[in-house]
Amino acid sequence: MRAGIIERVARSKKRLEKNESSGGGDNRAEIYRGPFMLASTGHRYFPRSAQDSAALRREAAFRAQVSDLREAMDRLEKEQAIQFQRFAQIQQELDEIRRLLKKAVEAR
């Protein structure tokens, strides 16, 4: 794979030299940014994918956190629904006990 990159860089340089020698068009030597080559500013150039990888990792982590929060919310909603049903059941049983007690007191 590394040999392929080196060959592509060499071909690109030859093409640029050919354009410069023929005086053709814009000065591409100044804007050429091969893989990990020094830019005209002297800073090391990294391909776009390397620059974006940190942002992509942050975005993936954010999405994972949002997904975890959604799952937690769904779990809480289900538990809340179960508790509400249980409270309704207990209230119904209490109402039945009160009704029976009232009936027993009236029978005396």
Image (spheres, rainbow, N blue to C red):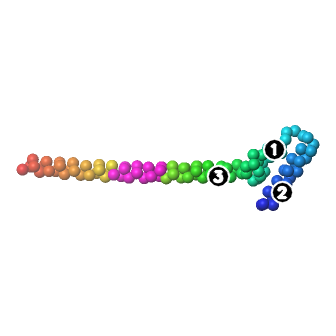
Going from N to C along the chain, the mark reached first, 3 or 2, is: 2
Q: Secondary structure at mark 3?
A: helix
Going from N to C along the chain, the mark reached first, 2 or 1, is: 2
Marks 1 and 3 sit apart, C-alpha to C-alpha, by 26 Å
Residue placed under numbered mark 2 in the picture: 7
Q: Amino acid at mark 3?
A: Ser
Q: Amino acid at mark 1?
A: Glu
In front of the other: 94 or 54:
54
Categorize mark 1 by other alpha carbons within 10 Å: few (<14), some (14-19), many (20+): few
| Residue 26 x/y as whole percent | 85, 39
Q: Amino acid at mark 2?
A: Glu
The magenta segment is 69-83
Numbered label attached to residue 53:
3
In front of the other: 96 or 23:
23
| Residue 103 x/y as whole percent | 13, 48
Categorize mark 2 by other alpha carbons within 10 Å: few (<14), some (14-19), many (20+): few
| Residue 98 x/y as whole percent | 17, 49
Q: Residue at x 33, y 49 (%)?
A: 84
